[in-house]
Amino acid sequence: MKPTVLLAGIVLLAGCGADPVPTESAAATPAQSAASLDGTLTAADRQDVAALRAATAQFHRIEVANAAGYNNQFPAGCMESSAGGMGIHYLNGDNVGSLDPTRPQLVIYEPEQNGTLRLVAVEFIYPGQPTDPAPVLFGQSFRWNETFQVWALHVWIFRNNPTGLFQDWNPDVSCQFAPTTSTMVH
């Protein structure tokens, strides 16, 4: 599937999305950052993760993410499963088809009790077929997402994930305060 076809489908599915609530969330603490980087990453992978964190830190404020093109909620609602939560995803369609480690296709927010959104992770998606070789970033192979028919890789750079930096679901993320929740397999 060509990136333009996938992008058209994603934008069509995403719609306009609701106006997000601004947040003043703080970045992950150094302890969280260090805990997320287990010893399995090479020095080059660690540098790429650090570059990703630096490039996306500005998106703690959702209005900055919106201005940078992350303004379509996709999929709608806060995603959760029995394995944990993901949060609310905002898509930048201009980044679809890129494997630049500093240009994720999605930024992910956890809804807070006070109505704000806290940046917790990013997600890379890449068009293709399940029979294609998996794309690789940060030394990690993407996983095929059957639901959305794309290759996907989560990176929990702003919220420690006890199950791993690159896992889909985070048991420490909740959709408890989200206005809309989607329970799904990812």
Image (cartoon, rainbow, N blue to C red):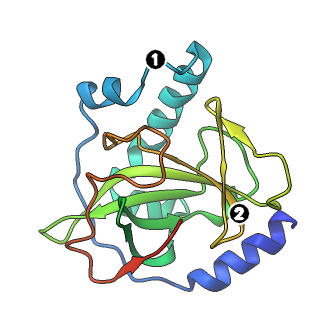
Residue at the image point whose x is 85% and y is 52% from the top: 132
| Residue lying farthest to the left in this orientation | 114
Q: Are marks 1 and 2 in contact (CB under 8 Å)?
A: no
Horizontally, residue 134 falls left or right of residue 124, namely right
Horizontal placement of 142 versus 78: left or right?
right
Eyeballing the image, is 32 above or below 109? above
**Up-down relation of residue 17 to residue 34 (above or below):** below
> CA–CA distance between discs 1 and 2?
28 Å
Image spot of residue 87 (x, y percent) = 37, 64
Quadrant assignment, res 145: bottom right
Give the SS element for disc 2.
strand
State the quadrant of the N terminus. bottom right
Q: Disc 1 or 2, which lies upstream in sequence?
A: 1
Q: Residue at x 83, y 46 (%)?
A: 133
Around disc 2, counting alpha carbons within 10 Å, would you say few (fewer than 14), some (14 to 19), or many (20 or more)? many
Which residue corresponds to mark 2? 150
Counting from the top left corner in percent of width and height, residue 118 is at 28, 56
Count the numbered circles shown.
2
Q: Label 1 sits on what residue type?
A: Gly
Where residue 27 appears, as percent x and y from the top left, is 28, 40
Residue at figure coordinates x 22%, y 66% from the top left: 116
User: Mark 1: few, some, or many residues within 10 Å (few <14, many ≥20)?
Assistant: few
Is residue 186 depicted above or below 171 in this figure? Answer: below
Seen from this angle, which residue lies furthest front? 82
Q: Which residue is mark 1?
A: 39
Residue at image x 13%, y 68%?
113
Q: Nearer the viewer, residue 106 or 85?
A: 85
Q: Secondary structure at mark 1?
A: loop
Q: The residue under label 2 is which amino acid type? A: Val
